[in-house]
Amino acid sequence: MRFLGKDRILVIKMRYIGDVLLITPFLRALRKGYPGAKISVLVNKGTEETLENNPYIDEAITFDRSWGLTKQMSFIRKLKKEEFETTIDLTNSDRSAWIARFLKPYSRVGIKGHKNFRNKRLYNILLDIPNDLGEEERNLEVGRQLGLRRLEPETEIFLLDEEVEKAMALIKDVKKPYAVFHPGARRWYKSWPTERFAELADRTVRAGVEVVICGGSMDVENAGKIESAMTERATNIAGKTTIRDLAVVERESIFFVGNDSAPMHIACSMGATTIGLFGPTDFRRWHPIGKKHFVFAHDVDCSPCGHSKDCDKGDKTCMRLITVDEVYEAVEYILEQRAIEMQLEAEAN
C-alpha cells in the first residue's frame, strides 16, 4: 500500500450530488484499509446529504462556492488546523488542488491531468488513471493504485427509519408496483421532452404500474407539464422531496426513468432498475454499473459535447432522437422479468 498518513485523511470531491455518490465505494474501501483513521470528506454545499449517516466517514465538510476570496481563505486556514496527514483529491480541479496544497499534508494524492503545473507542484503522489474508464470505475482505480483492497462498485446511501417513514408518507396513496419518472436535468438540452415522458407514463400505467413523478424545485414546471399531458393518473411530488426522500421513494419502486442526472445514480444506489436517457454527456463514463440497468443514447457528430454551452440544434437535439417506443421496450422487459420472478417465488412457496 502506498504510504498515506494513518490518522487524519481528507478526501476532496467538490462536484455535484451524483459525483459525490459515486465516491462512496472508494470511501468504503478506504475505511476498511484504514479502520483507525479519522476520514473527512470535503464537498460542495448542497451535496452533503448524500453522505449523511455514512459509517465509513467521520464527517462531511462543506465548501460554499458563493464565498468570496476572504471567506474562502478563512475557511482554508480553519481547515488547516485539522492537521490532515493525507489529502486525496478526486475532484481533479484547480480549486481542489490548491486547497490540498495550502493544507500542507504529508501526502497530497491527485489524478494526473493535462496541466503540468498542477501535476508537478500541487501533488506529491500522482496517479495516472486511464481516461476511458467510467466515473465510478475511475474512483475504484484510484483505490487500486493506492493499494486498497475489497473494492466493490456498489454505491450506498444510508437511511434512518424515520426518514423512510417521512418519505413514504408523501406517496401514501400510491399502490405498488409503481415507477419513478424524473424529468430533471441541469440544462434543457440534457432533458428528454416532457411530452415523451407523458406518453411513456401513460403506457406504463396502462400496463398496471402506477407512476410517481419526482423532481427538485427546478423541475416543478416540467413535472407539471408531464402530469397535464397524461391521460392516465399519476402522483406528482416534484418540489416536495429532499435527496434522502427521493432515495426512499426510488428504493421502493420497480424501476426509474430519467435523464443523466443525480437521481439516476441515487436510484441505482437504492437497488432500483434504472432507465437512463443520455445525450450531451458520454454514457460510457456516466452510466450506472450493473446488468439490471438500461441506457439509451444515439450517436451524433457533436456528442458528447460536454454541455458547457447552449445547444443550437433546436428540435433535432440528441435527446429527441430517443423514441418512446424504444424506451417502452425496456419497460416491457422489466415487467416481464418481474412477472417471472413473482411466479417462481409463488411456486417455491
Image: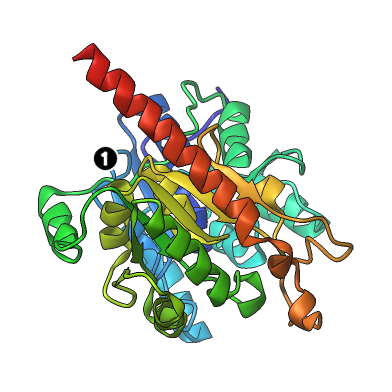
Q: Residue at point 52% right, 55% down?
A: 19
- Residue pointed to by mark 1: 55
Query: In front: 269, or 121?
Result: 269
Q: How far from the left and from the top, in percent, is residue 213?
A: 37, 68
Query: In front: 139, or 283?
Result: 283
Q: How far from the left and from the top, in percent, is residue 110?
A: 64, 47
Which quadrant would residue 219 be assigned to in this image?
bottom left
Q: How far from the left and from the top, in percent, is residue 311?
A: 76, 80
Is 254 rendered above or below residue 244?
above
The quadrant the N terminus occupies is top right
- Please, what secondary structure does the residue beneath circle 1 have? loop
Residue 176: tell me if it is visible: yes
Which quadrant would residue 235 be assigned to in this image?
bottom left
Label tally: 1
Q: How far from the left and from the top, in percent, is residue 179?
A: 37, 54
Which quadrant would residue 93 be assigned to in this image?
bottom right
Is 195 rendered above or below residue 275?
below
Is 274 rendered above or below residue 201?
above
Residue 9: tell me if it is visible: no
Q: Residue at point 71% right, 71% down?
A: 307
Q: Amino acid at mark 1?
A: Pro
